[in-house]
Image: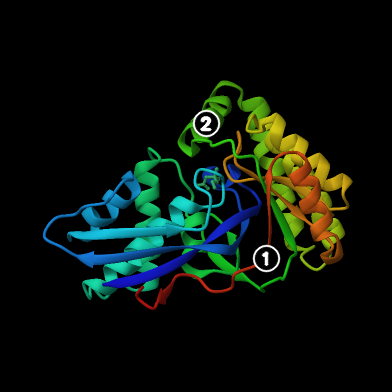
Amino acid sequence: MATWSAPGKVFLFGEHAVVFGKPGVAMAIRPRVYVTVRRAKRTTDVKSPYLEECFCQMGVHGTLYVRSLLPSASGLGSSAAVTVATLCAINDEFGLGHTREEVSQLAFEIEKKVQKGRASPTDTYVSSFGGLVLIDPTTKRRLPPQNFPLVIGNTGISHNTSHMLEMVAAFRKASPEIALPLLDAIEGTTRKALHSLNNPKDLGNLMDVNHALLEALGVGHPVLSKLVLSARAAGAFGAKLTGAGGGGCMVALCPSRLRSRVAGAIKACDASPLITTIDTEGARKEKNV
Ligand code: MEV
């Protein structure tokens, strides 16, 4: 029996644009997902296409126990975290000897397959290695870790990442004269953010701009907008939706002393707040439970 965990993530900049070869910045966050794998004659208890693929691609059979402290279908990378933790646990339980890089790459291929060919390696890479990461078309680079005080607001409205990706792809095809400049402008916010990592005020402003661009791209939601506006009014440096959009979560960058106030403002909108920050560790082995 082997138990592994992997962290969730937030996109600080560049979601959707990364799928079209633009850069993005994402950060691993607490909480984590815990997965226990035990070898068996048949594969059982596998309730998601991501997990079926994990056993299929690794060519083994086993049983699975998943304990997730991350809300699913909410933009916090729970499917990637479960996939990465499952692959690591299978790798360990069956002594397959894959490197972390290989596991991360395989997790990305699984996500891509399940999401009908549309996925960036962001979620799976961040969940595998932890920390603050720049995803570029040619490289993935861990940036110096920043202890950003973040408040996440979960709308509780579940979304389907594949569906949101299809919507953006359709918009890009039907109206390239509008969609392409929006994707370029999102790239602009990401590139500028890389020079503002030590300046939370500027970073917050860039998050606000990124949010507006995502809304223009068609992946906003009225409840997300409400949470973003409430977080800003409560003193956040900036706030934006995070992940695929259309529901799910938003993230606010806050002055440390105002985290509880921002969380309270999100709660007052009937959403679930989560105060969090960076998780510098990626996937890790846990004591068996
Ligand atoms: C989902 O968390 C973020 C998207 O950019 C998809 C991806 O990067 O795979 C919408």
Placement of 223 over or under 105, stated as above or below: above
Placement of 188 over or under 144, stated as above or below: above
Q: Secondary structure at mark 2?
A: helix
Measuring from the top left, give residue 227's x and y in whole percent.
75, 40
Measuring from the top left, give residue 75's x and y in whole percent.
56, 46
Label disc, if present, on residue 129 of the rendered structure: none
Residue sitting at the far bottom: 287
Amino acid found under the numbered disc labelled 1: Thr
Is 246 positioned to the left or the right of 193 in the image? left
Q: Secondary structure at mark 1?
A: loop
Q: Kindly tell me whether residue 24 is visible in this rendering.
A: no
Residue at 39 percent of width and 72 percent of height: 100
Placement of 7 over or under 137, stated as above or below: below
| Relative depth, front residue between 27 and 232 | 232
Measuring from the top left, give residue 244's x and y in whole percent.
57, 41
Viewport quadrant of the N terminus: bottom left
Residue at 52 percent of width and 25 percent of height: 170
Label disc, if present, on residue 169 of the rendered structure: 2
Is 194 positioned to the left or the right of 173 in the image? right
Tag 1: Cα neighbours inside 10 Å, few (<14), some, or many (≥20)? many
Residue sitting at the far left: 41
- Ligand 1 within 8 Å of disc 2? The answer is no
Dot 1 or dot 2, earlier in sequence: 2
Marks 1 and 2, Cα distance to the nearest angstrom? 32 Å
Label disc, if present, on residue 277 of the rendered structure: 1
Give the foreground label among 1 and 2. 1
Amino acid found under the numbered disc labelled 2: Ala
Viewport quadrant of the C terminus: bottom left
Tag 2: Cα neighbours inside 10 Å, few (<14), some, or many (≥20)? some
Residue at 28 percent of width and 65 percent of height: 37
State the colouring used for the structure image: rainbow
Residue at 58 percent of width and 25 percent of height: 171
